[in-house]
Amino acid sequence: MSYLPLPEPGATPVRVMTIAGSDSGGGAGIQADMRTFALLGVHSAVTVTAVTVQNSTGVRGFHEIPLDIVAGQIDAVVTDIGVQAAKTGMLASSEIIDTVATTWRGLGLHGTVPLVVDPVCASMHGDPLLHPSALDSLRTELFPLATLVTPNLDEVRLLVGIDVVDETTQKEAARALHALGPQWALVKGGHLRRSSHSPDLLFDGTDFYEFDATRIDTPHDHGAGDTLAAATACALAHGYSVPDAVAFAKSWVTECLRAAYPLGAGHGPVSALFRLSK
Ligand code: PXL
């Protein structure tokens, strides 16, 4: 595959911000985002929303960052360093979602800077990363600001109440997600475990785009969703169209899945580190 243009040494790279939670095990969340940003040659700016206590076997708990500190991180970065795109991951609570949305709008970023919203609700182990009462804030406050939303099938069920089992229900879900206000909705098929492919469906309110990739069957796919959203944000920051950015991110995450490694007693992470040997 071809990658994104790398910065010249000493030149300021393209900047992307992740607004997400920390994973102490280093597999998902901010840590996964920063690996993808770095290995795609992008400068990582970070707004920490929550600190999770976790390892490869699950999430033991998390601490939410105070709202003024969440808003302050976004403001400090945007008013000085500037970002060409951002992505959100774990946002933990409706108060944090509202704070991110208000700050994003207040800084005049809506419609100017591409925003990828990965509506993280739970870890791969099923441990909650978002209070159930926060789903409404995701739908009404953040989705309308999103360039692209990237739910997996569990998140689709929680957000729009549709059980995606085939192409027809995947289209129905894309329409329902798009109706919540994002410019584009991507329904990831990665959890349709029966198939040997993992077709993702992208919708802009008019046209459907299908992205297919061979399924990489590995128990070590911690951070796959984060990595897809992070790579999409990097490509958008470089000026790619949304379909081109998703196509790029899909091949990036497929390579990261091929390079995934065991870690601890549970699920290991997808790995962007393969790029260091190329
Ligand atoms: O992969 C979703 C995710 C996002 N952010 C954090 C996580 C996880 C999954 O465990 O821990 C912090």
Image: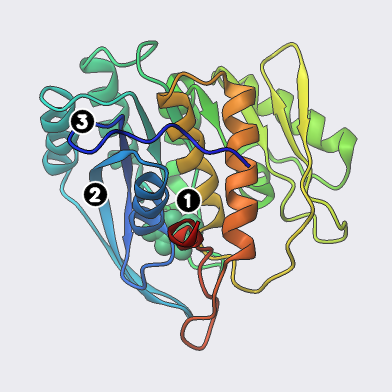
Q: Quadrant of the N terminus?
A: top right
- The 10 Å Cα crowd at callout 1, few under 14, some 14 to 19, many 20 or more, is few
Q: Residue 48: which numbered mark, if any?
A: 2
- The 10 Å Cα crowd at callout 2, few under 14, some 14 to 19, many 20 or more, is many
The x and y percentages for residue 103 are 23, 25
Q: Are marks 1 and 2 in contact (CB under 8 Å)?
A: no
- The 10 Å Cα crowd at callout 3, few under 14, some 14 to 19, many 20 or more, is few
Would you say the beta carbon of the disc 1 residue lies within 8 angstroms of ligand 1? Answer: no
First in sequence, mark 3 or 1: give its number: 3
Which sits in the foreground, 91 or 223?
A: 223
| Secondary structure beneath label 3 | loop
First in sequence, mark 1 or 2: give its number: 2
| Secondary structure beneath label 1 | helix
The x and y percentages for residue 12 are 21, 30
Which sits in the foreground, 8 or 226?
A: 8
Q: What amino acid is at disc 1?
A: Pro
Q: What amino acid is at disc 3?
A: Ala
Q: Residue 146: which numbered mark, if any?
A: none
Q: In this figure, which residue is indicated by the disc labeled 1?
A: 132
Which sits in the foreground, 183 or 198?
A: 198
Count of numbered labels shown in the rendering: 3
Q: What amino acid is at disc 2?
A: Val
Is residue 128 visible from the viewing direction of this image?
no
Q: CA distance from mark 1 to mark 2?
A: 20 Å
How is the rendered protein coloured? rainbow
- Horizontal arrangement in the rendering, residue 251 relative to residue 269 (left or right): right
Q: Residue 11: which numbered mark, if any?
A: 3
Q: Nearer the viewer, mark 2 or mark 3?
A: 3
Ligand 1 location (quadrant): bottom left
Rendered view: 69 above or below 121: above
Q: Are marks 3 and 1 in contact (CB under 8 Å)?
A: no
